[in-house]
Image (spheres, grey):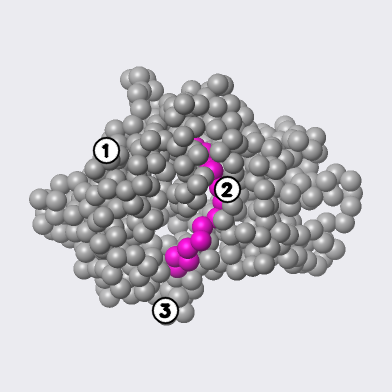
């Protein structure tokens, strides 16, 4: 059977789609991807004639994909399957017009079972991980066990992405993942809800072998431009024995600089030495909130300022770039709390401070808390695709809300130039405007090129990346 994945836009390789494609292709099915900012999905689908349309949907983009699906279905008759974070945590999406099935959780073998059943004309109502419409009824099936041995999956299908997206194909930065899962229960994250869904059905954290990770990177390096590796794992440093083997082998077998995510409470001298030996040049560290109560009681980060300062100091002393991630506009928080986060980041002195406007995503603990406590303006259906634009959280006044949204654009510059923080506190009184947006974009672009993912670009490559980057968010 032919399967067509439809995606709005890409700023990096989607690991889930690549894995699902490799599993389907290994079973003899045909798979294609159309990216809407590269090609017309309706025309592509009309020519390709798939038996199944697949959409990976994040909260905020659901309206776009439902509308796109309706347009495509006017041209072809295909089973419309929706997966990804939004359908997983808001499976009521199955009730929407044009949705034939919702795939919840890990999709590789669930999708293969669905495609096999459709191709063979078999009953689809009882397939694990699926909520489906069949015979006028909605069938809600439980999940199957998690894939325990990630090496049992075929390598992710990078060709699927690079055949459809020339910017990512030509980019010298490419993205990989070494494992799945996270042991922590941060209230804003999907991991705790995901773990509850899969309770008793597999290990929460699973790692691919170092052999498999190195083989994947090597295969991409031999076929496509690659000078900088980004590991997307939530926490790259969870397994110290795994990391030790990786640090012993990766520099000799691959030898490319890389980026990874860490947690402050796990960072010590030995850990930093391992990352340095492996070739890590940039580390991302979640601070999230400067206020201790917000960080630990509301966000459930369970880490102290001392741990954050110590981890940051060790990373900087090792000569690695430090990127911080932060959230402002938290339910129950204030502008003063967000300025605390700005001040803490300035003291940490990162190479770049990333900041997001909190989004109360469905089924996360903090999203549910925001709804229960009346912090939502409108409904969760009003969440935007980007965490950089607007907030749907209520604050003490519209003025405070506008200033928090404006702070998001000026935050990183304030961290970079702490002497200008008093000026930043005055500038946020001016409503958000194109000048602030441009300053935010230009500084972020510069920091990513020079500090976050440092690598060489020819002038024409830099122009292409800038043009693509300015369209995102």
Residue denoted by label 2: 207
Query: Residue 270: x, y in percent?
Result: 36, 47
**Front label number (2 vs 3):** 2
Identify which residue, 177 or 51, lies in the foreground. 177
Residue denoted by label 3: 374
Q: Is residue 407 above or below residue 196?
A: above
Q: Secondary structure at mark 2?
A: strand
Identify which residue, 195 or 67, lies in the foreground. 195
Would residue 161 be visible to someone looking at this image?
no
- Disc 2 + disc 3, Cβ < 8 Å: no
Q: Is residue 395 left or right of residue 365?
A: left
Q: Which residues are magenta?
A: 175-187
Residue 423, which numbered label?
A: none
Q: Is residue 218 above or below residue 6?
A: above
Badge 3: residue crowd in 10 Å (few <14, some 14–19, many ≥20): few
Q: Could you tell me how far apart the alpha carbons at marks 2 and 3 are, in whole angstroms?
A: 39 Å
The extreme bottom residue here reads 373
The residue that appears at 46% across and 42% down in the rendered structure is 244
Q: Secondary structure at mark 1?
A: loop
The residue that appears at 42% across and 80% down in the rendered structure is 373
Badge 1: residue crowd in 10 Å (few <14, some 14–19, many ≥20): few
Query: Residue 170: x, y in percent?
Result: 48, 24
Q: Earlier along the polypeptide chain: callout 3 or callout 1?
A: 1
> Can you tell which quarter of the image residue 40 is in?
top right
């Amino acid at each position: 059977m032919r399967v067509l994945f439809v995606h709005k836009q890409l700023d990096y390789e989607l690991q889930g789609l690549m894995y699902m494609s490799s599993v389907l292709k290994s079973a003899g099915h045909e798979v294609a991807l159309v990216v809407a900012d590269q090609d017309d999905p309706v025309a592509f689908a009309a020519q390709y004639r798939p038996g199944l349309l697949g959409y990976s949907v994040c909260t905020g983009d659901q309206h776009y994909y439902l509308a796109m699906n309706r347009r495509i279905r006017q041209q072809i008759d295909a089973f419309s399957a929706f997966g990804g974070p939004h359908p997983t945590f808001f499976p009521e999406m199955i009730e929407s017009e044009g949705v034939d099935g919702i795939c919840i959780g890990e999709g590789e073998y669930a999708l293969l079972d669905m495609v096999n059943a459709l191709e063979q004309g078999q009953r689809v109502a009882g397939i694990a991980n699926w909520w489906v419409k069949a015979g006028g009824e909605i069938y809600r099936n439980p999940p199957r066990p998690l894939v325990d041995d990630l090496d049992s999956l075929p390598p992710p299908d990078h060709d699927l992405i690079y055949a459809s997206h020339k910017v990512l194909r030509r980019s010298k930065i490419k993205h990989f993942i070494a494992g799945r899962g996270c042991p922590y229960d941060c209230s804003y994250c999907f991991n705790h809800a995901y773990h509850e869904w899969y309770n008793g059905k597999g290990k929460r954290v699973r790692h691919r072998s170092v052999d498999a990770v190195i083989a994947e990177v090597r295969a991409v390096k031999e076929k496509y431009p690659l000078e900088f590796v980004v590991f997307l794992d939530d926490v790259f440093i969870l397994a110290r024995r795994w990391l030790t083997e990786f640090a012993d082998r990766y520099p000799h077998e691959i030898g490319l600089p890389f980026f990874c995510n860490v947690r402050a409470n796990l960072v010590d001298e030995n850990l930093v030495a391992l990352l340095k030996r492996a070739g890590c040049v940039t580390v991302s560290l979640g601070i999230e909130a400067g206020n201790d109560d917000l960080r630990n009681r509301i966000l459930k980060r369970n880490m102290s300022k001392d741990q954050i300062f110590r981890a940051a100091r060790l990373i900087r002393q090792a000569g690695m770039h430090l990127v911080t991630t932060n959230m402002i506009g938290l339910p129950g928080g204030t502008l003063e709390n967000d300025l605390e986060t700005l001040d803490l980041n300035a003291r940490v002195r990162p190479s770049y401070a990333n900041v997001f406007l909190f989004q109360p995503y469905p089924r996360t603990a903090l999203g549910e808390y925001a709804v229960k406590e009346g912090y939502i303006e409108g409904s969760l259906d009003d969440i935007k695709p980007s965490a950089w634009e607007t907030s749907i959280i209520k604050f003490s006044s519209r003025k405070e809300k506008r200033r928090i949204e404006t702070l998001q654009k000026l935050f990183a510059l304030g961290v970079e130039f702490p002497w200008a923080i008093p000026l930043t506190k005055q500038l946020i009184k001016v409503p958000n405007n194109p000048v602030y947006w441009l300053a935010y974009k230009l500084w972020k672009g510069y920091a990513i090129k020079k500090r976050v993912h440092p690598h060489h670009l020819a002038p024409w490559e830099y122009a292409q990346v800038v043009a693509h980057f300015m369209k995102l968010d």
